[in-house]
């Protein structure tokens, strides 16, 4: 039981490039979340999903896209990377909305 | 709108000393409250939570937090810290009846630095 896994661990992008951050959970959780963490700012919710095929925006969705075709996977897409997207990205999952969220180890992204 | 404020960005303390990490929240509706801990280069782990019932909640490693509705606070305390408690601590809230989406609102985080 690996929990929540994220790939890659680190990535450097040039401005304007695109990439997908991968998130997979093996706990059969319906709820999944993407957060970004910036120093002194805590975590901000980017997107979330309450089940396969259902996604919705969080606090800071601009510049990102998500999809949820399976229960296990919840990839986050950056289409045109900007320096403001330099951050640490965390994926989390939960069996349902009222339960604890389980976090992955994070992806550290630098856009230069 | 709801918000969470952690009043200290960094708290240095010597080993075996007591510590308090402060958390205040703002909400016009009832909330659930959480403390998460993030050890260096790791993801967040749930430390403790207040959902209902007793306003004093405890973790398995000696931390406790008290929900104070009148002061809208949920401060985290430990009577004697260890070097291994060095980490970043996040206070978070979830609104009752938030459509069961489970969305969390986080504070800015407090870095606890335990010195030998």
Image (tube, helix red, strand yellow):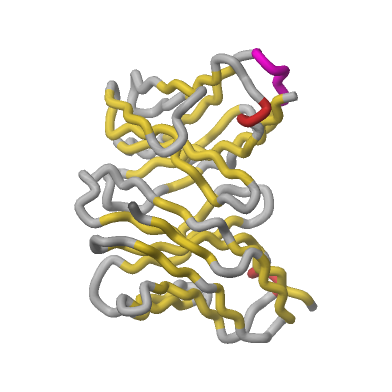
Tell me residue B33's x, y (percent): 36, 64
Residue B116's place in the image compared with A86, above or below, is below
Q: What stretch is highlighted in magenta?
A: A12-16
What residue is drawn where x is 28% and y is 66%? Answer: B51
What residue is drawn where x is 40% and y is 49%? Answer: A101
Tell me residue A49's x, y (percent): 33, 32
What residue is drawn where x is 59% and y is 39%? Answer: A106
What residue is drawn where x is 27% and y is 42%? Answer: B101
Quadrant assignment for the C terminus of chain A: top right
* Secondary structure, magenta segment, majority class: loop
Compared across the picture, whether B79 is left or right of B33 comes to right
Residue A30 image-quadrant placement: top left
Q: Is residue A1 visible?
A: no
Residue B25's place in the image compared with B76, above or below, is above
Tell me residue A7's x, y (percent): 59, 28
Tell me residue B39's x, y (percent): 63, 57
The residue lying toward the viewer, choosing from B24 and B49, is B24
The residue lying toward the viewer, choosing from A67 and A104, is A67
Q: Can residue B62 be seen in this view?
A: yes
Residue B70 image-quadrant placement: bottom left
| Residue farthest to the right, as pictured | B116
- Does B75 appear in magenta? no
Compared across the picture, whether A12 is left or right of A107 comes to right
């Amino acid at each position: 039981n690996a929990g929540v896994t994220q790939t890659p661990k680190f990535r450097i992008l040039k401005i304007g490039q695109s990439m997908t951050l991968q998130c997979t959970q093996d706990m059969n959780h319906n709820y999944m979340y993407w957060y970004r963490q910036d120093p002194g700012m805590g975590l901000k919710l980017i997107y979330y999903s309450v089940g396969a095929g259902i996604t919705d925006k969080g606090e800071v969705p601009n510049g990102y896209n998500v999809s949820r075709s399976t229960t296990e996977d919840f990839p986050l897409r950056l289409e045109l990377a900007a320096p403001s997207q330099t951050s640490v990205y965390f994926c989390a999952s939960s069996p349902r909305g009222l339960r604890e969220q389980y976090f992955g180890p994070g992806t550290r992204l630098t856009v230069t | 709108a709801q918000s969470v404020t952690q009043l200290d960005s960094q708290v240095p303390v010597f080993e075996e000393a007591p510590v308090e990490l402060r958390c205040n929240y703002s909400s016009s509706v009832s909330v659930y409250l959480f403390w998460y801990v993030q050890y260096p280069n790791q993801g967040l782990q749930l430390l403790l939570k207040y959902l209902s019932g007793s306003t004093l909640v405890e973790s398995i490693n000696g931390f406790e937090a008290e929900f104070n509705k009148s002061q809208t606070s949920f401060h985290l305390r430990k009577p004697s810290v260890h070097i291994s408690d060095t980490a970043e601590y996040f206070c978070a809230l979830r609104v009752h009846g938030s459509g069961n989406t489970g969305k969390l609102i986080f504070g800015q985080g407090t870095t606890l630095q335990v010195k030998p």
